[in-house]
Image (cartoon, helix red, strand yellow):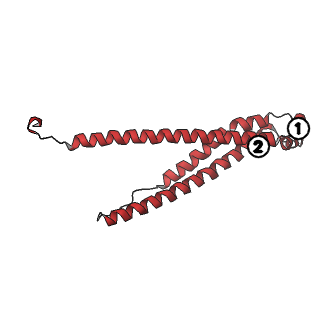
Amino acid sequence: MEALGYRSFSYAAEFAEIGRFLLLFNLGLGAIGVVALATAALGIVNTMLMSVSERRREIGILRSLGAEAFDIRMLFLVESGLIGAFGSALGILLGWGVARLGSRVAREIMIRQDVEPFDLFATPPWLVLTALLFGTFVSVVAGALPAARASREDPVQALRYE
């Protein structure tokens, strides 16, 4: 057939090729997500370490008033968890807004091309909840080192710190 100038075509082969492309595309997006997550976690660690160093005197006062190391650790873990929860919520809202805008533009293009319009981007509630919980979890894990450092702070040395 090919010697006569004809080419054979198989939908199964095309679907397999599209499947490979989508797999590679998803792997690339996953890699970008991991890099973004690691960068965010390092940013939270940095923020919390700076918070511990700037609040040494406060930590010393709390310890001298009877706060246990566990209380200080929990204070910083809750703070890092709140940073993660607010950051995750803001990221979810921003992503949802961009998806809505993209869907609206795609819908307009479909209407102009006389194609039955459909929603390109779906945001299921389980995905929103999972993203919020995962972002908060990563923030709490990232805040564990600074929280442990704050809980080991010597009250006498912390009160002398200026």
In the foreground, 87 or 74: 87
In the foreground, 13 or 111: 111
Mark identifier at residue 51 = 2
Task: Residue 103: give x, y in percent of width and height.
Answer: 42, 60
Residue under the image location 8 percent in, 38 percent down: 4
Q: CA distance from mark 1 to mark 2?
A: 14 Å
Q: Residue furthest left?
A: 4
Q: Is residue 41 left or right of residue 127?
A: right
Q: Amino acid at mark 1?
A: Tyr
N-terminal of the two: label 1 or label 2?
Answer: 2
Q: Which residue is mark 1?
A: 161
Placement of the C terminus among the 4 image quadrants: top right
User: Do the residues bearing badges 1 and 2 touch, measured as CB atoms within 8 Å?
Assistant: no
Q: Amino acid at mark 2?
A: Ser
| Location of residue 18 (image quadrant) | top left
Task: Residue 151: give x, y in percent of width and height.
Answer: 78, 36
Residue 12 visible within the image: yes
In the foreground, 158 or 162: 162
Placement of the N terminus among the 4 image quadrants: top left
